[in-house]
Image (cartoon, rainbow, N blue to C red):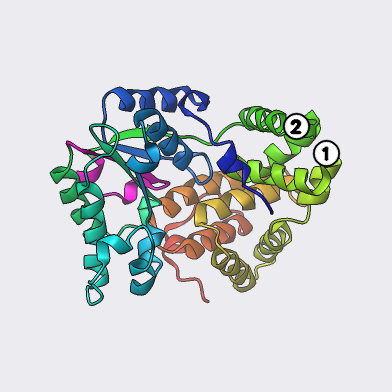
Amino acid sequence: MQGPLWTDTHAPDLDEIRQDEARDRLRRAVDEPMNLVVQGPPGVGKTAAARALADASHADPEADLIEINVADFFGRTKKEIRTDPRFEGFLEGRSRMAKRDMINRVLKESASYAPMSGEYKTVLLDNAEAIREDFQQALRRVMEKHHRTTQFVIATRQPSKLIAPIRSRCFPVRVRSPTTDETIDVLEAICDREGVDYDGDGLEFVASAAGGDLREAILSAQATAVESDEITMSTAYETLGEVGDDDALRGALADARNGDLKDARSTLDDLLDEGYDGQELLRETLRVARAGSEYGGDDLARLHALAGEADLDLSDGLDDTTHLVHLLAAWAAGRTELSPALRDAEVAP
């Protein structure tokens, strides 16, 4: 997709955040700086909310907002971290430093620098559920030492992964998945600003297909507008109908019903490798099951009942594939609960 992304060019300011509770809690942090845990599912606007807070809080947000995505550290080599323009000034001349020490130094230096345009600066740690516990202990010490001049905003889809000392030092801000109507309102506002023609059916199709993922809805609307110069039901379907992994998910559901859990597991492994996380893949599986005509009301009711328990397991567990295959196995077997034996069973690779 050419050109700037609509998620960037139409990022909301604080007053445009449509969830009243989240907006009110963020406003409190403007006048009374405090550490925050911004929590919610993927794609609902956690990072955008943190940036909106920084824009409202700092005269020069570009200077006083430091963004660190956890993947910048834990998914990269030492050389990649050391040569990142954001971090190379902190790590110059330290080529022999261990990766652990590099990360700790970047955190300490980011927090210790004096603010440029006010009394404090903001450090945003994104995707914080991936921070190992030993690094969280180091982060806790940095937060304690620099609490007068640095506000930490920790964005995560799994707050339970944060250690208690960090959670106790942060005010929670919950960002829920938007409703379809709320998503449509956002898309209407963006299309009006962009001068893109649309109709209600087209925006509803885009919003419904996104399943509560606002980021996906905005990017899908942009893809449709770029492809067809308008957003209608037909243009959205033509652009998005072949996008995604619906066929693969339908195949996994069918394999599970036919007792072929090995193939179902293989499909789920492939989708997780492509970048899905477990809870996102669970939502997509439910959407595909609802959209098809293969399963009746009783089947769907049992699948949703099992999904609630699986969602909790995915929040706390370490192996997304195992929890998702357990869900499909229980559903295919006609169970309404995951039995202890099935929960503890090893699913053959």
Q: Secondary structure at mark 1?
A: helix
Asked whether, in this view, residue 162 is left or right of residue 342, the answer is left
- Residue at the outermost left position: 145
Question: Which residue occupies the foreground of this view, 120 or 336?
Answer: 120
Closer to the chain start, of discs 2 and 1, is 2
Q: Is residue 5 visible?
A: yes
- In the rendered structure, which amino acid carries the disc numbered 2? Gly
Q: Quadrant of residue 344?
A: bottom left
Is residue 213 in view? no
Closer to us: mark 2 or mark 1?
Answer: 2
User: Which residue is denoted by mark 1 in the rendering?
Assistant: 233
Which element type, helix, strand or loop, lies under badge 2? loop
Check the image and report above or below for 300 versus 99.
above
Residue in the foreground of this view, choosing between 307 and 92: 92
Residue on which the image places disc 2: 195
Residue type beneath disc 1: Met
> Residue 166 occupies which quadrant of the picture?
top left
Q: Is residue 85 magenta?
A: no
The 10 Å Cα crowd at callout 1, few under 14, some 14 to 19, many 20 or more, is some
In this rendering, position of residue 75 left or right of residue 4: left
| On screen, residue 178 above or below 276 | above
Where in the figure is residue 278, as x and y percent of width and height? Answer: 51, 56
For the point 37% across and 68% down, which residue is it? 83
Query: In the image, which residues are magenta?
Result: 148-167
Q: Residues within 10 Å of mark 2 (few under 14, many from 20)?
A: few
Q: CA distance from mark 2 to mark 1?
A: 18 Å
